[in-house]
Every structure is written in C-alpha cells, then in structure tokens.
C-alpha cells in the first residue's frame, strides 16, 4: 500500500498535496490512533459493504501499537485503492481535513476507526445524494455495541433510540456522515483548533449555512461504549470542555447549572423543601425517557437486572451531569486563554 508521506521543516510530517479536481466516486475517510485491537473487525466491516468505496483515505496520528503495520497488511489485497498519511500528533479535525484533502471522490463518507459499519451503511448513506442532486449531506445513525451491565446502563443514559430523534434537530456524529466535497470546502472543514467536539462544530457551521440535508436512519454504524465509569465520565468531561472552548450550547449548559442550583435550594431551604414533590416529579419525567430505553438496550437481561437499571441510570445521569459541568467550566477557561 503506498503511503502518501511528505516531511516539512524539522522532519515534521505535513499533509500530502490536496487533489485539485474531485472525481465522481465515493471516498471513505477515517482517522486512526493506536487501533490495533479493533482494526481487523473495522476493516472487515468495510470489506463487507454492499456498496464498496471507490477509495479509502486514512490518516494516522502516530500509532505505536502496530496499527500502521496491520493496515499495510490488511490493505494489500483490498479491492479498492487505499492511501495512508501519517501525521504525528495531529488531532481528529486535522486528520479528517488532511484525508478529505487527499480524496478524489466527489462524495466523502466519514467514519471512525474502531467502529463496526453495518453491511449496508455506505450504500444507504450515499444513496440520497445520488437520487437527488439537491441534497448535499446525509446524516447516518449509530447504535451501541454493549456487553456488560454497565455498558448497557450507559447506553440507556446517553444514547437516543431512532424514534426519539427529530430529523430537523439531529446533530450527527462524524462516525456516520456523508457529504459532497463542496460542503467541506464551503465550511472551511473541521476546526483544527478544537481538540474535542469538532464534529458538532462542523455541524453548526453547515446548518447555519442552510446546507440541504436528510437523515438516513438505516445507515448504521455500531460503536463500543466506554467499559467503566472513569472512562465514561472523562468522555463527557471532554465533550463539555469542547463546548465551553468553542462556545457551543451555552443555553443547554446554563440550564444544567440552574437546575442543580435549584435542587440545592430545595434541599437546603425550608421554602425550597415545599417544592420537593413537584421537583421530584419533574426529575422523574426527565429520567423517564432514559428508563424507556431499557427494553431495547437491555433486551435479554433478566427482569431483576432491568429493574436494577432504573436507579443505576439515574445515578449515572447525575455523575455525567457533574462531569459536564466541570468540563464546561474548564472549556470556558481554555476559551478565555485562547
């Protein structure tokens, strides 16, 4: 497999020359960093697509676990061209921009290494753009891969089911997204100054520009939940830090701080305690949507374990909210320094 490597001053890896004229095909792009444990499964899901990409462009951030060597071996017999760029230390946004700059296809399909693509994912996510020349972006969907009780509880607490999503308001993850190259060019690409939350910032940009888009609920990517509380809470701390640094979702975060200030007032003040019952009812309604996910995400679990998930989901939601509040404050501090 040819590596598109180019070194600048001081030996730093710089992007390969961007392709000046895009073709009419589909380029699948992804970034990688130390994905050796999950690489074979992800690559197999690419090979198993009902509509295979016309090319694959990958950017590695400097893996040290054998990812690069595995990629060379796996792609040696690939039925499509594979290009690999190594960009030591680059973040996800820069990696994606480099990959898209190297792409020759008119349509860019974006996903993450370490996920598992549904067998019809690529076919479903690009079909609307072939059927309607006026559609420039397609938002795919995603489902969790779970194995443990904690992972299933985490899915209930954090991930919507397909029926919950309103297409008009849906903000897709770049683990399941496709768009015309012109969208990337018009938006200026992913924000390379933002370490976390780059896909949400990209979403806000193209939505504010009025890019015509649709949602493909059956274009599915599967991804693994964090295995334990520490890694999950760190994930949401970083998401919220990205929000604070980039200025995204200020009303949502302000509401969270206001809600917990009100809960503290209810707990500490005699006047507030008189509002405990309606406050508890409102909290139960808020958590209720997460509890409704139990039959889907915990299918096959004994009834006693599904019942035990109810308080566990509530406690996890509290912990995640705490991580988000801490992360948002940290993000505001980074924004001020920047």
Image (cartoon, rainbow, N blue to C red):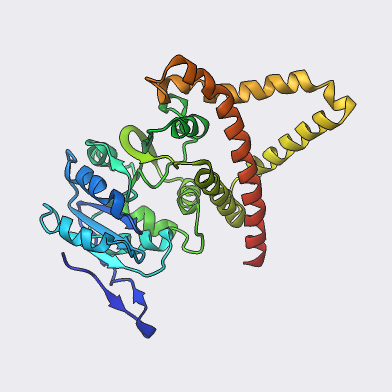
Which residue reaches farthest top?
303
226 is higher (above) or lower (below) than 148: below
Closest to the observer: 194 or 266?
Answer: 266
Q: Residue at x 54, y 49 (%)?
A: 234
Q: Position of residue 258 (x, y in %)?
A: 74, 38
Q: Residue at x 29, y 68 (%)?
A: 18
**Total tally of numbered discs in the picture:** 0
Residue 24 placement, left or right of 12 = left
Closest to the observer: 119 or 32?
Answer: 32
* Picture quarter with the N terminus: bottom left
76 is higher (above) or lower (below) than 117: below
Closest to the observer: 331 or 231?
Answer: 231
User: Can residue 122 be seen here?
Assistant: yes
270 is higher (above) or lower (below) than 174: above
33 is higher (above) or lower (below) than 206: below
Which residue reaches farthest bottom?
10
User: Can residue 159 be seen here?
Assistant: no
Q: Position of residue 60 (x, y in %)?
A: 32, 63
Residue 20 lies in quadrant: bottom left
* Picture quarter with the C terminus: bottom right
Q: Position of residue 112 (x, y in %)?
A: 34, 49
Residue 253 lies in quadrant: top right
Q: Position of residue 207 (x, y in %)?
A: 47, 45
Q: Residue at x 59, y 40 (%)?
A: 320
Residue 268 placement, left or right of 17 = right
Residue 289 placement, left or right of 29 = right
């Amino acid at each position: 497999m040819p590596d598109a490597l180019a070194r600048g001053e001081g030996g730093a890896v710089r992007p390969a020359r961007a392709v000046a004229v895009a073709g009419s095909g589909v380029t699948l792009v992804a970034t990688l960093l130390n994905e050796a444990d999950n690489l074979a499964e992800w690559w197999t899901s690419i090979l198993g697509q009902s509509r295979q990409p016309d090319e694959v462009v990958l950017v590695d951030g400097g893996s040290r676990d054998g990812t690069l060597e595995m990629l060379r071996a796996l792609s040696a017999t690939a039925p499509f061209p594979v290009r690999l760029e190594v960009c030591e230390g680059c973040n996800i946004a820069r990696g994606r921009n480099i990959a898209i700059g190297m792409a020759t296809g008119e349509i860019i399909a974006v996903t993450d290494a370490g996920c598992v693509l549904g067998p019809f994912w690529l076919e479903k996510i690009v079909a609307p753009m072939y059927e309607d020349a006026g559609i420039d972006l397609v938002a795919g969907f995603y489902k969790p891969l779970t194995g443990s009780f904690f992972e299933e509880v985490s899915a209930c607490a954090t991930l919507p089911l397909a029926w919950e999503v309103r297409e008009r308001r849906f903000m897709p993850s770049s683990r399941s997204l496709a768009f015309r190259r012109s969208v990337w060019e018009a938006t200026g690409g992913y924000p390379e100054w933002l370490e976390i939350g780059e896909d949400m910032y990209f979403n806000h940009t193209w939505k504010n520009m009025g890019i015509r888009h649709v949602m493909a609920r059956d274009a599915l990517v599967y991804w693994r939940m964090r295995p334990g509380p520490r890694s999950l809470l760190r994930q949401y701390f970083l998401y919220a830090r990205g929000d604070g640094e980039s200025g995204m979702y200020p009303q949502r975060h302000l509401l969270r701080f206001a809600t917990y200030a009100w809960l503290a007032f209810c707990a500490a003040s005699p006047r507030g305690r008189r509002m405990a019952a309606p406050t508890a009812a409102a909290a139960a309604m808020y958590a209720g949507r997460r509890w409704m996910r139990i039959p889907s995400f915990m299918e096959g679990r004994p009834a006693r374990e599904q019942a035990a998930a109810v308080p566990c989901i509530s406690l996890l939601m509290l912990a995640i909210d705490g991580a988000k509040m801490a992360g948002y404050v940290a993000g505001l501090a980074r924004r001020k320094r920047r």
